[in-house]
Image: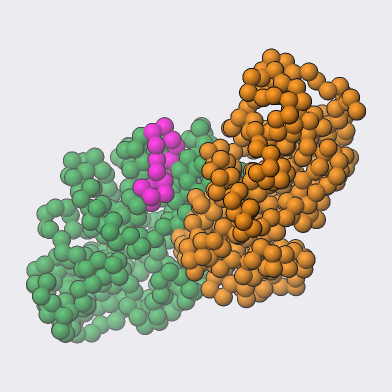
Chain colours: A green, B orange
Amino acid sequence: MATRRSVVLASRPQGEPTAANFAIIEGPIPEPGPGEVVTRTLYLSLDPYMRGRLSAAKSYAKPVEIGEVMTGETVGEVIASAHPDYAPGDIVVGPRGWSTHCVSGGTSVWGAALTKLQPGAAPLSYYLGILGMPGVTAYSGMTDIGTPKAGETAVISAASGAVGSVAGQLAKRAGARVVGIVGGADKVRFVKDELGFDECVDHRGPDLRAALAEACPKGIDIYFENVGGDVQAAMFPLLNDFARMIMCGMVAEYNDTSPRPGPNLMSAVRKRLRIQGLIVSDKPERFAEWRALAAPWIKDGSLKYREDVAEGLEAAPEAFIGLLRGRNFGKLVVKVS
Amino acid sequence: MATRRSVVLASRPQGEPTAANFAIIEGPIPEPGPGEVVTRTLYLSLDPYMRGRLSAAKSYAKPVEIGEVMTGETVGEVIASAHPDYAPGDIVVGPRGWSTHCVSGGTSVWGAALTKLQPGAAPLSYYLGILGMPGVTAYSGMTDIGTPKAGETAVISAASGAVGSVAGQLAKRAGARVVGIVGGADKVRFVKDELGFDECVDHRGPDLRAALAEACPKGIDIYFENVGGDVQAAMFPLLNDFARMIMCGMVAEYNDTSPRPGPNLMSAVRKRLRIQGLIVSDKPERFAEWRALAAPWIKDGSLKYREDVAEGLEAAPEAFIGLLRGRNFGKLVVKVS
């Protein structure tokens, strides 16, 4: 196959994206210009934040333009290089886009150089998940904002996902009682039996607030926010004095066409809450730190991880649409070649 | 006069308090029991937080019961003492209640001992305002959460009040551009001409959001929240990336019978906001620190302050009702005797 295939944004979604918002384009595999590197994509990461890139609204990152290749992290193999630091055969991780082949200089929007991986240290796709952006998000959120202490109660939304599963396991390591929130009985079982959370609540159950109150008899000291919506509304009244809300994402609201009201903030005064947002690209120095910490835990089995793998670049749009609905089970990646 | 008069809570207000929610009771001036101190009240502080004490709802402090004397900070003179550390003639500040005379042990709900004041260091009523609870609130809020830096924009609501006037002057000392929000043209003038803020917006004007946007051409980096309501809603979209919201109070909503919706918190993710609450009684160690810092600034005229003095204990209920409407101009105190 001598062509490159890429997924581009065909039109901006109103509400939930559909397959028609994406298109596949083909073209020749490029040659590297001076200082450039061409890679063949092995794995592509699909993450909720990408929904923001489909919108023209002002945000912390610029939107994908119509006709432009979708942005995304990949693990790839260098197949041609005009950059002194990279040679064919090198395995690299970086923001390369929804494409079978990518060409770029050796730097990354995450602030670090296109990172060369040591094959064999961990499965390559892990560098898009537990050892990559989502893992670092969980780590820096828990370390800088959550600061879990023994005996505290930490609640993690989207607990079976790439960020939530790590966030909860880190709180557990710190001695907290950890309660997950997920959608579906299979995810409840996974979070309790595999990840080792103390409790897990199904947000699709009949009375989320009652279930959450029962799972958190001492209230909530730390809440890791990945979903927003009804889950946020159910959780908010249970926050204890001095509770921390790690604001990482609100995927349940990403397809909304107008923003929902949030909680009345007088609780932030009365309870001395700390509600703080986090975007991992602000913390490039945390990537190497987290990889050094987590890789041995993955190897010794004390840090668990689950992936949901879609096959082939063409599967990416539908897999991404499913991600926004919570259809994935574990960190969603696309095996591109 | 050989009697003690006190203001008690006669009934719980629904919505805005009225004079009928309060009653005056009389009784003999007590004798001190072992370890107790009796004071004659000179000044009583009236503060927005007291609205919370009128409600039976769970909060960080227990409510005032029906028939119980209203709580409040006072400056008083010791007239009888059975405590080794206090002698008649001592001037003390502490939480003594809406009463002409108080009896209590030598400790304070603010976590410090009933503090003896050095007469002459500053006007005695200042220990209820700029050198007391409101001043320490402004100081610890700005120091621990606001962290103003040169060139940043700090917006202060209720800017002519006890907390806001200090908060803004501290941000100005740190090199920030400081914008006040007040109700009324006389307060606008005071905040700009006397306190030295760079700009001040009247929230009673026709288009608060436009006025605020014009006063903050570079957006808002620090917001000191004293009022909530429409002011919070107008300010929120103007927050910059990494902005800090110091959640101190929301007086415009204290008479609400059901909570208003708040802002959608996705902005906290996108902009990496930090929204954090503060209650000064958590920080007793800050009182002495602030007094040592601020007293020289008051003396040399570089830290400005304005009081609104009501005369006589009987005036307290109406003055307090006016405070909730923003009728006071400066820190509200009652001259009791």
**Whether residue A276 is situated above or below residue B46 in the rendered picture:** below
Q: Quadrant of the C terminus of chain B?
A: top right
> Which quadrant of the view contains residue A89?
bottom left
**Residue depicted at x 12% and y 71%:** A85
**Whether residue A114 is situated above or below residue B59 in the rendered picture:** below
Across and down, in percent, residue A334 comes to: 27, 63
The residue most toward the front is B120
The residue closer to the viewer here, B256 or A45, is B256
The residue closer to the viewer here, A246 or B199, is B199
Q: Is residue A178 visible?
A: yes
> Which quadrant of the view contains residue A45?
bottom left
**Whether residue B283 is situated above or below residue B147 in the rendered picture:** above
Q: How many marks?
A: 0
The magenta region covers A141-155
Query: Does B314 sit left or right of A98 as displayed?
Result: right
Query: Does A267 sit left or right of A111 as displayed?
Result: right
**Residue depicted at x 23% and y 72%:** A107
Across and down, in percent, residue A270 comes to: 61, 43
Across and down, in percent, residue B6 comes to: 83, 31
Query: Does B219 sit left or right of B16 as displayed?
Result: left
Q: Is residue B61 visible?
A: no
Across and down, in percent, residue B155 comes to: 60, 63
> Which quadrant of the view contains residue B38?
top right
Q: Is residue B8 magenta?
A: no
**Residue depicted at x 25% and y 82%:** A26
Q: Quadrant of the N terminus of chain B?
A: top right
**Residue depicted at x 35% and y 80%:** A68
The residue most toward the right is B1
The residue closer to the viewer here, B171 or B49, is B171
Q: Is residue A143 magenta?
A: yes
